[in-house]
Amino acid sequence: MGFEKFGHISFTSQTKVADFVDYLEKGEVRGTQCVSCKRTFFPPRADCAWCLASEVEWVAVEGEGKLVSFTKANYAPTGFEADAPYILALADFNGVRVFGRLSNDVPEKDTKVGMPVKIKPISLPGGQLSYEFRTT
Amino acid sequence: MPNDVAIIGVGQSSFVRNYEGSIRELSFEAYKEAMLDAGLSNEDIGASIICSAPEYDKQRSPAALVAEYLGLIPQPTFYVETVCSSSTTGIRVGYSLIKSGLHDLVVVLGFQKMSEISSADSQERMGRGADIMWESPFGTMMPAYYALHARAHFDRYGSTEKDLALIRLKAAKYGKLNEKAVFRKDLELDQVLNADPIATPLKRFDCCANADGSSCLILASAEKAKELSKKPVWIKGLGSAIASQTMTGRETLDGLSCAREAAKEAYNMAGMTPQDIDVAEVHDCFTIAEMMAYENLGFAEPGKGPELIKEGETYIGGKIPVNVDGGLLSKGHPIGATGGSQVRTIVLQLRDEAGDIQVPGAETGLVHNIGGVGIYGNVIIMGR
């Protein structure tokens, strides 16, 4: 339990990496790292498929990232209609890639592939937790 | 260049917005056409493979129900699913059943009745074809995912919305000739460019329409094909690969790695190169998907896809005619039936039976069918 608090609408509640949500609550976005081979995983994984090991540590995703691509979604799927339009994006933080939304403060015309972004945990209505990309 | 498994019968229902019948009746339309085409009756068939994407079906475990309606009892049947590429995955499985010697005549039937649920619901369910833990909670839909690929292609190679619109105009031109297509209207460049943005840079006409439909293929062993068919079309090469379902796991977004890998395997098996292909059907669920297919299949160098369409090289008469049946953009995209429909078009081309859209002298054809947003890639090369 616990993972149901992640995102605008969560579709699953049970995962071994539900601590992700606790870190969000503390203001941090974290991925995991295999203790043995040091591969970093985002989204976080509980298991390393390369070492067949299940010992991972939580590591912060932070600093300046770069926008890899983005789209302004003018239509939303069932349950998300009130949010539209919003910008969905993929960003790269020193080789760790993260999928999410860009802050509503950033208009599409000012959004460019390659532009620097930061990642910030956010609170959503109903006690949900998430993160978003910001330019400042 | 193996000649072990052939396609000896093809069938397809009309693709429509709202089929007024059940999934078993929809499936029967394609089955009947394929069986009449092959000149077979139900007791000749050794096994059936039923392909669809289960999220749209109200019926649970539809394989036996459909097989029962087709009269394929007691022959074994089972369900194959890789979302939008389900029926070409069905061909891969059917090929294996025949090559292994277990069966010598196999039915591959794909169907989808997308109108069983609302469009918003279907988009939400399609969105859940992506990673439900880490992406769906942000409100994702298929157009948004392909839009991320489009933006990355634009940024890296300088391709434009107009380049994509040219692909849509080609689809409209040929869709008009296809009696089984859902979209048969003319389109003008301005109409395509000024259409409602769905997920930028993709606009209304960059997206294919949901549709209801079915497709059916009869696969035969070499011995049966020679005995039963005057014009068998041989499966020369098969390639299949996957890519990370989660977008964060993709090295680049300006192409689909599953398609590149699948194409490599299929060309190797066939002992062919892209230059050997006379006609192709590619998975144009969105205009950008056809653009990436040009490059991922080797019809154009990476980044040079726009030149192919701008110079008209993917029209009949061009270097490599692509989607001359209107593609998914005009035919519509009944998920489980789509791959089988693409294969049917190529089979008709190679038999010289494609009518108004015949590519003169086509001897070798290729199908590129993608499941989800570049998750599952299937490439099939066929020859006379």
Image (cartoon, coloured by chain):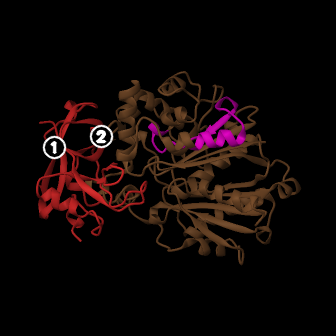
Chain colours: A red, B brown
Tell me what residue is drawn at x 66 percent, y 45 percent. B345
Q: Quadrant of the N terminus of chain B?
A: top right
Tell me what residue is drawn at x 35 percent, y 34 percent. B151
As drawn, A110 above or below A29 = above
Tell me what residue is drawn at x 20 percent, y 33 percent. A116
User: Mark 2 or mark 1, which is nearer the start of the sequence?
Assistant: 2
Q: Which segment is the magenta one?
A: B262-289
Is B263 one of the magenta-colored residues?
Answer: yes
Is B214 one of the magenta-colored residues?
Answer: no
State whether residue B212 appears in this view.
Answer: no
Left or right, B341 with respect to A72, comes to: right
Tell me what residue is drawn at x 40 percent, y 32 percent. B153
**Same chain shared by disc 1 and disc 2:** yes
- Please state the horizontal and vertical placement of residue A22, each as a whole percent of the image: 16, 62
Q: Which mark is residue A71?
A: 2
* Residue topped by disc 1: A104
Badge 1, how many Cα within 10 Å: few under 14, some, many 20+? few
Q: Which mark is residue A64?
A: none
Between A17 and B88, the one nearer to me in the picture: A17
Left or right, B196 with respect to B245, comes to: left
| Residue type, numbered disc 1 | Asn
User: Disc count in the image?
Assistant: 2
How many angstroms separate mark 1 from mark 2 (CA)? 13 Å
The answer for which chain carries disc 2 is: A
State whether residue B359 appears in this view.
Answer: yes
**Residue B110, quarter of the rendered image:** bottom right
- Most extreme residue toward the bottom is B74
| Residue type, numbered disc 2 | Thr
